[in-house]
Image (cartoon, helix red, strand yellow):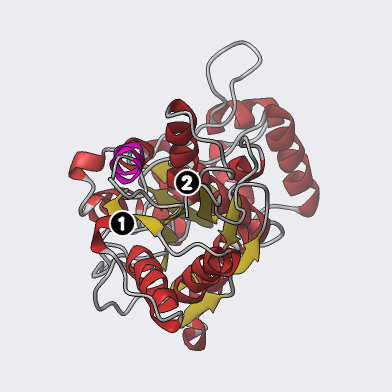
Amino acid sequence: MRGSEVDLDQQAGATGLPAPGGGRVTMQQVAAEAGVSVSTVSKVLNGRYGVSPATSEHVMGVITRLGYEASLVARSLRNRRTNVIGVLVADFEPFSTEVLKGAADAIRGSGFELVAYSAGGRVDEHVGWERRYLSRVMGTLVDGAVLVTPTVTDVQYDGPVVAVDPHTGRSSLPTVAGDNLQGARLGVDHLLGLGHTRIGMVTGRPDLVSAQLRERGYREAHAAAGLVVDEDLLALGAFEAEQARVAAHHLLSLPDPPTAVFAANDRSALAVLEVAAERGLEVPGDLSVIGFDNVPESALSDPPLTTVEQPIRRMGHDAVALLLSLLDGDEAAATQLTLPTTLVTRRSTAAPSTSRD
């Protein structure tokens, strides 16, 4: 037997906002306040027949005044939909925060709600985190999910999933990413155009497609300029500030250090600026630094950071828009989106000092 909506709500803990006298609003409190039965409240909530328009309007007024809301679990048990989508991130850092802003832009007026879920930044055990968290939320808390920089893309769940800036490897998931290859070439070409020939690179996470493409762009820009890459000028930053600091110290301690550094993301570039200051180097007088992403912090650094902008906020927006299309049954929407990148010139780059070249 299917069971009533009332039973499902009670079993799932249907509650709302705190009641005026403490605790949380229950369906029973709504019924008592409205002077109707609990089953009538349930019928109103679920749009079932058997309730007059006047009674329905009265009950909805009480529901609004008391702040009652059926739990997501109850909603999913009853309708097989929660009207909630999830954005799963490894951690709340500048990149994922901008993605979330774009996701919030896209959700407005859609009739869906948005929940953000963080893995807590456990970088030592990051591989496969999305599988664990998807199994917790998919189907009962959310109808679909956006994965931000997922470490694995062979996920299969009862609902659509879209990846932003995905892990390397074959995948059938719809994805949204910036044009990392062209962006890296733009950044390195900018440094080459200023006259730099010894350009270091603080590389990204080697398991992510974005990091691999940015390193490839670095190499292609050198090749196009007729320069051979000095492998000693590449150091692993892994998109993490502390690792980038180690990389920067290594590069700037070389017998023949670089006159410019291209960092695979702004987080790493900001770490390079810090290390340069600690070592008494002036930017851009002694060292030019360029990042990638154009997170808000990049414009606030000292000096403001030249960077390659990928439209992170738009990536979040387009990922959610794509997910909503898939939830509406638009299979043609399942595609791979690559958004353009542009160079943003600020004060952290200049021609190399004649005393160093």
Q: Which residue is mark 1?
A: 233
Name the residue at the right extreme. Answer: 54
Instruction: Specify start and end residues of the magenta stretch as a single range.
Output: 245-252
Q: If the image is split into quadrants, where does the N terminus sit?
A: bottom left
Is 317 on the left or on the right of 72, as rendered?
Answer: right
Residue at the location (51% across, 47% down)?
355
Q: Nearer the viewer, residue 174 or 86?
A: 174
Q: Is residue 24 above or below residue 147?
A: above
Distance CA(mark 1)–CA(mark 2): 15 Å
Name the residue at the top extreme. Answer: 21
Is 190 on the left or on the right of 105, as rendered?
Answer: left
Among the 4 quarters of the image, the one containing residue 231: bottom left
Picture coordinates of residue 303, whole percent (x, y)? 63, 39
Labelled disc at residue 347 = none
Name the element at disc 2. helix
Is residue 73 among the parts visible in the rendering? Answer: yes
Residue at the location (57% across, 12% down)?
22
Is 336 on the left or on the right of 35, as rendered?
Answer: left
Q: Is residue 160 magenta?
A: no
Labelled disc at residue 269 = 2
Is 149 on the left or on the right of 267, as rendered?
Answer: left
**Neighbours of disc 2 within 10 Å: few (<14), some (14-19), many (20+):** many
Foreground: disc 1 or disc 2: 1
Name the residue at the bottom extreme. Answer: 332
